Image (tube, rainbow, N blue to C red):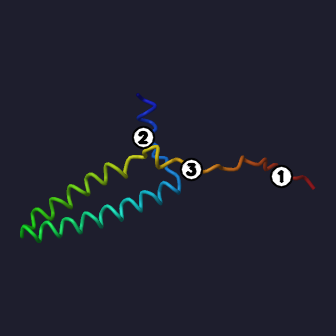
Amino acid sequence: MSSFLQEITEGKIDFAGQSLVELISKVALSAAGVVAFCVGFAVQDLRITFGIMGFATVVLALVVIPPWPMFNRHPVKWLPVADRKPKSQ
């Protein structure tokens, strides 16, 4: 269980995962905004509009904030460390 907690707290996601998180966030918040506006306008209640947006924000935060494995499918392959010995002249 401690390795799982360590993995979660390290927060490793790759560049493709960051792009995916950004896309999911933009699409979900835009869709939630449109739905919240339409429902709130239909029932003429601003509390419902803010409730829908708040709920969507909390659900979205649970989806995109933790470093799920689907956000680290293309890890960066770093080059090995090169020996840097000063050359004597």
Residue 37, compared with residue 76, is above or below; it is: below
> Reading the chain from its start, which is encountered first: label 3 or label 2?
2
Q: Which residue extends farthest top?
A: 1
CA neighbours of label 2 inside 10 A, class few (<14), some (14 to 19), many (20+): some
Residue 7 relative to residue 75: left or right = left
Q: Return the residue at label 3.
A: 74
Q: Return the residue at label 1.
A: 86
Q: Return the residue at label 2.
A: 8
CA neighbours of label 1 inside 10 A, class few (<14), some (14 to 19), many (20+): few
> Reading the chain from its start, which is encountered first: label 1 or label 2?
2
Q: Position of residue 78 (x, y in %)?
A: 66, 50
Residue at 25% in and 53% down: 58
Q: Amino acid at mark 1?
A: Pro
**Tag in front: 3 or 2:** 3
Residue at 30% in and 63% down: 29
Cα–Cα span, label 1 and label 3: 35 Å
Tell me, yes or no, whether the two marked residues, 3 and 2, touch with CB atoms within 8 Å: no
Q: Position of residue 55 (x, y in %)?
A: 20, 55
Q: Is 65 in front, or is 25?
A: 25
Q: Secondary structure at mark 2?
A: helix
> Reading the chain from its start, which is encountered first: label 1 or label 3?
3
**In which quadrant of the rendered view does residue 27 lie?**
bottom left
Q: Amino acid at mark 3?
A: His
